[in-house]
Amino acid sequence: MTQAARAAVLISGSGTNLQAILKVIDSGELPLKIACVISDRGDALGLERARAARAPTTVVDYAAIGDRAIAESALQQELKRVGPDLVVLAGFMRILPAALVEAYSGRMLNIHPSLLPKYRGLNTYTRALAAGDEEHGSTVHFVVPELDAGPAIIQYRVPISADETEKSLKAKVQAGEYLIYPEAIGWLATRRLVFEHNAAWLDGRQLDGPIIRRPA
């Protein structure tokens, strides 16, 4: 039997995407072992979710350390200690240094709450509603040094209703995240998904755009 890939999951907050990943691992549908959950905050609820699942946890507390470069070095050393096959960003609210990203090139995924390349960065729900967009969603992408600019792999798209609020839109989008992120992680963990020539390849075919999922 092939050994499951080992993942380090980086979080900053409630860890709902982590919980979704843990659930699919527990079901046997995602061949992945959580090597460590690393948070940049000691009070992150996601740490409790990880401990409940008996996943190893550690904290690199950026605020307590007080120096960004020292904190980034500590994070890099922690990842080196863990030695993961892949790194999963699950609501990690820090911009990673280029050297760390490049060290895990092709092995680091992020999920961003917009239909990239639209709305890189923060406040994506507010921006989509203010622009009068007809749909919004989330994108799983490879991480590259430029923020939210790596090749898109899969998107979940939802319609924006006439009476949509930021809260209701976020709920719809996050429900889709819990489906597409484990799916993309599974592709990477089983080497169906690779990063070559600055592009995403799935089952030997270069993706000319993200795979699209929508509500049933």
Image: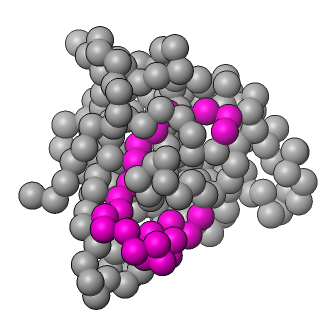
Give the image location of residue 154, x and y in percent: 33, 40
Residue furthest front in the image:
132
**Residue in the picture at 29% in, 15% down:** 205
| Residue 74 in sight from this viewpoint | no
Q: Residue at x 21, y 48 (%)?
A: 213
Quadrant position of the N terminus in the picture: top left
Q: Nearer the viewer, residue 55 or 214?
A: 214
* Left or right: 34, with 101 as reference point: left
Task: Give the percent coordinates (x, y) of residue 183.
Answer: 27, 39
Residue 58 seen in the figure: yes
For image coordinates 53% across by 35% down, the residue present is: 150
Return the x and y of residue 6 as percentages of the image width and height.
Answer: 44, 28
Could you tell me which residue is drawn at 28 percent across and 56 percent down?
157
Q: Is residue 95 magenta?
A: no
Q: Splitting the image into 4 quarters, where does residue 136 fall?
A: bottom left
Say if the magenta span includes residue 142: yes
Residue 108 relative to residue 176: left or right? right
Rendered location of residue 3, percent (x, y): 33, 17
* Range of residues picked out in magenta: 122-146
